[in-house]
Amino acid sequence: MTQIADIRFEAVDTDTLAEMPGLIAVLVGEGGKMDAQARRVNTLTRKALARAVDSEAFTKAKPGDVIRLAFPAGLAADAILVVKSGPKPDQTTARRIGAQLAKAQGKHPLCVLMGQTGSAEDVALGLALRGYKFTDHKSDKGDGPGPVTLMVADPEAVAKAARTGMAVAEGVVFTRDLVNEPANVLTTDDFAARLAAMQELGLEVEILEEDDLKALGMRALLAVGQGSASPSKVVVMQWNGGGDEAPFALVGKGVVFDTGGISLKPGANMEDMTMDMGGAGVVAGVMRTLALRKAKANVVGIVGIVENMPSGTAYRPGDVLTSMKGDTIEVVNTDAEGRLVLADVLWYTQDRFKPTGMINLATLTGAMLVALGHENAGVFSNSDDLAGAFLKAAGSEGEGAWRMPLAPAYDKIIDSHIADMKNSGGRHAGSITAAQFLKRFVKDDVPWCHLDIAGVASVKAETALAPKGATGWGVMALNRLIADRYES
């Protein structure tokens, strides 16, 4: 797994600043107000810091922006990073400060003078998340981020507060690594093995192989993977940190590569389909976070892992499949495969665990990108209460999400004349009809959300807290939801 930056918290010691190597970051408030630590740096640099703060560049800067002063006189450091912190930065600004510092840091050691600015744990989280680089397949892996020291008034208390954030960061990084991996590396076997390795964190992990899935009647899921040489699997991860209550459930689509099957996708950009296991990646990242921070909740994470390939054994348009639930499905498009995987896993989850609520995640439809772009995931739900709680959690963590409609009228679009339903209703309302399909495999008394993360799981340009590529979207929001709603 990609290593997170080594971040430490130490007591303020301005006597060591003159000889400190690497980079020194100074946080300056609105109007150029400098605290005692900043004033000490200003004295050592013969008022170079004051000149930077009085500059037009600093005046026009937004909270979190960084101005670099290279090779400052009076200091051994290579540069001072002058950060505009704004008036008492909130969580979003504090994380942005950390992210901007991570971008500026490179391989150098970094010391951040937090002064009287709170939210050091959020600055640390921003540093950890934005410092991520996926270099596993590069010959020249470059230098990893240098060590980071945050000078704070009470290092022990801040370090304790930051532990949860570091657990979240590790979950996000685990998800990013999974989503960034190419499909010749992250095969169905390798994916399952990486999840099984989390047993060392205290998770109970069980791998259901194809014979197990056949015995359970998961014929929809198995059909998707039958054209591939890689065996289909379901992995069950349990974290039992609560009492005797039934667990909350997370379900993920784990298509390690999606060619579209017989309904072959266009060749252009097909390489992006290595991220079609993004929903399962998020579930894995959340479960890792819960185990690392010893969450006081019972949560089960279940992922269906398959590969959708065209071959002489592949399932075909026109086939009729019988799901684990017993409902029959006419296949009209083998590229609408994720919902077939989820249909069986959703039913299995409810049948075995009787969860108090359930959220599934999937890079399910291209229509979601048309509707919401890369800014928001689509949220579909049969429960205003659960949907509202998730949207609140996502908002508090800065992860974009937008509620989308469900209605019986859309069900007509996926009715079939030869089976109980079709697996696709075509282009119109494509994301909604996919959600309506999944809803047929959710029991009426189970609060449920479907998160279509097709536009947010992996992106072509950097975001506030992630470089180009996999984002790990959803790990922070779901961890927050569980902490706020389900921990005892």
Image: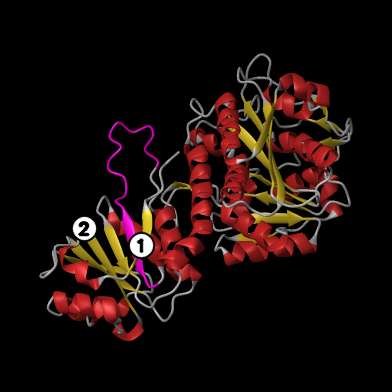
Instruction: Identify the residue under disc 2.
Output: 22
Between disc 2 and disc 1, whose residue precedes? 2
**Residue type marked 2:** Gly
Magenta range: 134-153
Residue at (42%, 64%) from the top-left corner? Answer: 123
Which secondary structure lies at badge 1?
Answer: helix
Residue 352 x, y percent position in the rendering: 82, 37
Residue 242 x, y percent position in the rendering: 73, 52
Which label sits in the foreground, 2 or 1? 2
Secondary structure, magenta segment, majority class:
loop
Label 2 crowd bin: few (<14), some (14–19), many (20+), radius 10 Å? some
Residue 471 x, y percent position in the rendering: 50, 49
Residue 75 part of the magenta-drawn span = no
Which secondary structure lies at badge 2?
Answer: loop
Residue 395 x, y percent position in the rendering: 60, 65
Instruction: Identify the residue under disc 1.
Output: 100
